[in-house]
Image: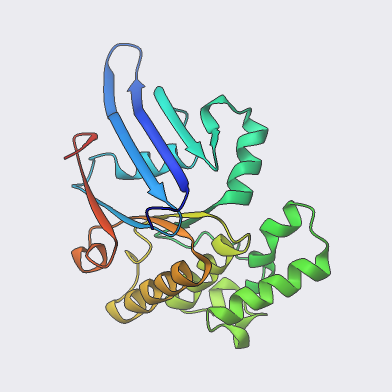
Amino acid sequence: MNDMPFALQARDLGKQYSDGINTVDVLSGIDMDIQAGERIAIIGASGSGKSTLLNCLGGIDELSRGSVTINGEDISQMSELARCRMRNHHLGFIYQFHHLLPEFTALENVAMPLLIDGVDVQQATRSAEEALTEMGLAQRLTHKPGELSGGERQRAAIARALIHKPMCVLADEPTGNLDSKNAQQVIDIIATLNTTHNTSLIIVTHDMHIAEKMDRVLELVDGQFR
């Protein structure tokens, strides 16, 4: 893996919040090098800054200082439009809650990122069907989220996150809302796709069983890696 290019890098990443009187350092001096295909677990106590770190790495939260480079480009120097395009093409996001749109079918939810990006309907639909089939949901394409089980909804959300074949997936407690059986199934699917597509994975988790399956485990303590 050492000869592969970096999918994501962070240098002296810092994030502060201020109420006009007090300033709180949520993240301070974070350095990261994530290689293509590498799997990283981030662990830490509640409030240690794990979710904020993912949001900064994904260009969702603005940095207070430092830089994040994805595919060789510093996202802190991009316009908001350019950052949105970068996220849509190069990153996939998986959360504890699926965030599927309830009025659309699984197929429509998964095809949506491609449609937003201007892909024609037939191609987007075909790609979404392939992604859902890869998740074991070939028989659930026309079902809406309310008609799917918790595990099925999370697998549909993973299909949506991977529809663009991103170079890096950012996952924030992706199994936190699932029972142990469905959680194991979701992790197995993510691991398989990581291997198949050489997709880098950064996963925030409190589950050491999951963390120990990753290539590296980074512990965040008071906004810094220990």
Along the horizontal axis of the image, is 209 left or right of 7?
Answer: left
In this view, the residue in front, 218 or 21, is 218
Observer-nearest residue: 118 or 97? 118
| Residue that protrudes farthest toward the bottom in the picture | 139
Instruction: Name, please, the residue furthest toward the front.
Output: 3
Tell me which corner region of the image, top left, top right, bottom left or bottom right, holds residue 195: bottom left
Q: Residue at x 65, y 80 (%)?
A: 141
Question: Which residue: 30% across, 76% down?
Answer: 179
Image coordinates of residue 151 in percent, x first then y, are 43, 76
**Can you give x and y, in whole percent of width and height, for residue 137 in the image?**
56, 82
Q: Where is residue 60 drawn, in percent x and y?
A: 50, 38
Q: Quadrant of the N terminus?
A: bottom left
The chosen color scheme is rainbow
Residue 36's x, y, as percent? 46, 55
In front here: 79 or 19? Answer: 79
Horizontal arrangement in the rendering, residue 64 relative to residue 89 (left or right): left
